[in-house]
DNA sequence: AAGCAGAGGTAAGGTCTC
DNA sequence: CCAAGAGACCTTACCTCT
């Protein structure tokens, strides 16, 4: 989907079309003040709110990053994952809106439903992306897939008012790259024969899976383009990147990918984490950290119950003020989805980590998940959470 | 008794993606 | 004075069992 989070907001506030808008930053839901009449006469229609009343990036205070920027904002150099303060310097006049996850999920379901009505074999890749298997869709091979891609774009637009970009290729690896070639609202077809002409000139970072670290390491080895990567001996790549990654890199550079479109999958872990508004100290801010910690455990427990899972491996994650991180986890005998149990075990994990430095982030994670069928029928069973956890939380 | 190989689990850290 | 949140997967190390 094109600038998904931002495009969803533009449906609600069409007066912002064509303007630089960024989504991200705060933890707020919808900006309540915006939706109320300044004279206090009650709520008003979002589409009638004058552009001049929207909050601007230059007035933003606090932590956070950009989740999505509209294309007009991107022309100022603003983009996903950029710190808000840096973005404010590049484009102070941009309008800022918080993420509305509920709304985003609603449109995510809508566009995915539009796709599966046409092509039933799909694999989720987050809220705004899917892989689609064209193989057995009637007409899926016409014009290399362009006809079907156009049909899908049309259906998504009719049902949601949103645009997307589609890449069609013999496998997922190449399709993903192809989808980047014609944004926004574009279609790109890549054939096997296009490997040398279209793929090899691209930078290695365009391969889905080669991130900043591998990109840097390849650069240090004198490899910039995918073609140069393809020219390397597989054994040499393995010697530098390990058996699995090295072999994969070699295959990827040659456009080879036989991974299937996986339609169903079980989650591996469920977690919640939060960055504090200011860095907190385990001793000095003990009470506040304790509250946040408990709330995280309760949220994870709620997520587990809602999704019907229990887990045996309970862990914490923290980030110090200097951005170094640490994780600890512990596996227990019996899978749980109980907030008090999570808090007890996570509290034990916390004791195993140095807490002299201030913290900026705390997270709670549950893994080794097992489905719990009854969870939906008996949510939050009212059994006693056990004795107070005061001692296990002594550090807080 | 000591050594080794392979499988599987646990733990910690890191990388990558949207 | 910066750098979110959720989740998947990989590597390495260590331990246990066979």
Image (cartoon, coloured by chain):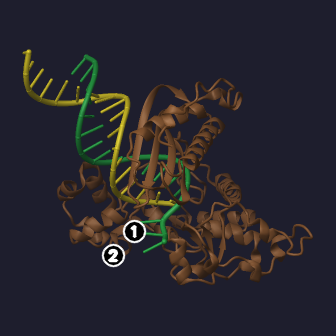
Chain colours: A brown, B yellow, C green
Q: Position of residue A55 (x, y in %)?
A: 70, 76
In the picture shown, does residue A226 fall above or below B6? below
Residue A130 placement (x, y as % from top left): 56, 56
Question: In the depicted view, which residue is nearer to us: A140 or A352?
Answer: A352
Residue A242 shown left or right of residue A311 in the figure? left
Residue assigned mark 1: A206
Q: Residue furthest front?
A: A284
Place residue A298 in its image quadrant. Answer: top right
Instruction: Choose between A156 and A291: the one closer to the eye.
Output: A291
Above or below: residue A174 compared with residue A92:
above
Task: Where is residue A308? Give x, y as percent.
Answer: 62, 34
Q: Tell me the quarter of the picture where residue A106 sits.
A: bottom right
Q: Quadrant of residue A228?
A: bottom left
Task: Name the spot of residue A387 as percent of width and height, x first.
Answer: 58, 25
Q: Taking A394 as reference, is C18 left or right?
A: left
Check the picture and name the quadrant holding the N terminus of chain A: bottom right
The chain under label 1 reads A
- Subunit bearing disc 2: A
**At x 47% / y 41%, what residue is drawn?**
A395
> Mark number for residue A341?
none
Q: Which residue is mark 2?
A: A201
| Residue at point 78%, 65% (across, down) | A32
Q: Nearer the viewer, mark 1 or mark 2?
A: 1
Residue at (35, 72) in percent of width and height: A203
In the image shown, does A310 or A342 lie closer to the viewer? A342
Residue A21 in view in this figure: no
Q: Secondary structure at mark 1?
A: helix
Does label 2 lie on the same chain as label 1? yes
Query: Is residue A167 depicted above or below A267 in this figure?
Result: below
Within-10-Å neighbours for mark 2: few <14, some 14–19, many 20+: some
Question: Going 70% across and 79% down the picture, which residue do you hit?
Answer: A17
């Amino acid at each position: 989907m094109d600038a998904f989070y931002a495009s969803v907001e533009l449906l609600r506030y069409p007066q912002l079309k064509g303007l630089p808008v960024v989504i991200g930053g705060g933890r707020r839901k919808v900006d309540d003040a915006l939706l109320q009449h300044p004279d206090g006469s009650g709520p008003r229609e979002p589409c009638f709110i004058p552009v001049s009343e929207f909050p601007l990036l230059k007035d933003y205070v606090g932590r956070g990053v950009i989740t999505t920027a509209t294309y007009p904002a991107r022309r100022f150099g603003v983009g996903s994952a950029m710190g808000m303060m840096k973005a404010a310097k590049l484009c102070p006049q941009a309008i800022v809106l918080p993420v509305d996850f509920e709304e985003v999920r609603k449109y995510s379901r809508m566009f995915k439903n539009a796709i599966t009505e046409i092509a039933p074999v799909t694999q989720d890749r987050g809220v705004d992306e899917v892989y689609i298997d064209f193989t057995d869709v009637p007409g899926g091979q016409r014009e290399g897939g362009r006809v079907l891609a156009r049909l899908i774009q049309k259906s998504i637009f009719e049902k949601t008012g949103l645009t997307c970009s589609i890449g069609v290729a013999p496998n997922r690896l190449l399709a993903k790259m192809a989808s980047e070639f014609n944004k926004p609202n574009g279609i790109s077809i890549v054939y096997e024969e296009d490997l040398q002409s279209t793929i090899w000139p691209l930078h290695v970072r365009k391969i889905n899976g080669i991130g900043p670290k591998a990109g840097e390491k390849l650069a240090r080895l004198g490899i910039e383009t995918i073609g140069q990567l393809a020219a390397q001996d597989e054994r040499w790549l393995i010697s530098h990147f390990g058996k699995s990654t090295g072999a994969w890199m070699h295959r990827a550079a040659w456009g080879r990918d036989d991974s299937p479109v996986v339609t169903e999958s079980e989650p591996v872990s469920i977690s919640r984490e939060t960055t504090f508004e200011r860095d907190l100290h385990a001793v000095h801010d003990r009470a506040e950290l304790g509250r946040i910690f408990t709330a995280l455990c309760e949220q994870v427990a709620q997520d587990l119950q809602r999704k019907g899972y229990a887990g045996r491996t309970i862990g914490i994650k923290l980030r110090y003020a200097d951005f170094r991180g640490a994780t600890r986890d512990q596996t227990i005998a019996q899978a749980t989805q109980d907030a008090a149990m999570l808090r007890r075990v996570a509290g034990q994990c916390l004791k195993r980590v140095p807490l002299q430095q201030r913290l900026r982030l705390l997270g709670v994670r549950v893994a080794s998940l097992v489905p719990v069928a009854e969870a939906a029928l008996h949510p939050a069973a009212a059994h006693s959470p056990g004795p107070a956890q005061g001692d296990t939380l002594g550090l807080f």
